[in-house]
Image: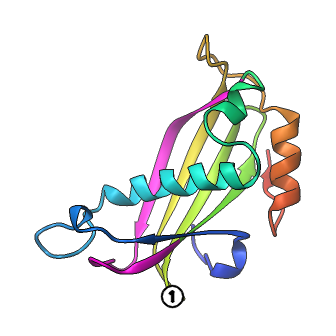
Amino acid sequence: MNGISREDFAFFYPLRVRWSEVDPQGIVFNPNYLAYADIALTEYMRRIGFPYPEGLIRLGSDLFAVRSEINFRASAKYDDELELAARISRIGRTSLTLTVGIFRGDELLCDVMMIYVNASPDSQKSTPLPEPLIETITAFEKRPPERS
């Protein structure tokens, strides 16, 4: 997850740090960055026309998180105005990788990588990603996602 910059992203979502998200040190408590990544994915999916969960369920799909990785670079503080930048950086047969950059202005505070597996909502068994989702993501992104 090296070399992340604002130019990598087509999608940004504003977020102001709330009091309930900071620890006694006055900085954002580290698990909140995963919540921020979840917000970024939710708003990204809404933006591309697949609001969660109904946007995927209508295609017989759902996404399940299977891995996350966080790189902490600098601290966000109470009342900071942040931008959550999100992109789908990789698309596999049954999974996709979400990359989130959390910025304060031009400063990258944190980057998050999450892998999601696509599955049937009923059986929760992995299934290929729906073509309409792949096509929409590919058309939306500034840089095409890596394919594997």
Using the image as rendered, state which of residue 51 and residue 27 is in the foreground. 51
Tell me which residue sits at (76%, 40%) in the image.
Answer: 92
**Number of marks in picture:** 1
Q: Is residue 79 magenta?
A: yes
Q: Taking 63 as reference, is 139 left or right?
A: right
Q: Taking 132 as reference, is 146 left or right?
A: left
Residue 112: x, y in percent? 50, 60
For this orientation, the residue located farthest to the left is 24
Residue 83: x, y in percent? 52, 74
The span shown in magenta is 61-83
Task: Name above or below for residue 13 compared with residue 66.
Answer: below
Tell me which residue sits at (25%, 63%) in the image.
Answer: 29
Residue 116: x, y in percent? 60, 39
Main secondary-structure element of the magenta-colored stretch: strand
Q: Secondary structure at mark 1?
A: loop
Question: Dividing the image into 4 quarters, which one contains the N terminus?
Answer: bottom right
Q: Residues within 10 Å of mark 1 (few under 14, many from 20)?
A: few
Disc 1 target residue: 105
Q: Is residue 28 magenta?
A: no
Tell me which residue sits at (57%, 73%) in the image.
Answer: 2
Instruction: Kindly identify the amino acid type of the residue bearing the numbered disc 1.
Output: Gly
Task: Name above or below for residue 103 compared with residue 42.
Answer: below
Task: Name above or below for residue 90 compared with residue 24.
Answer: above
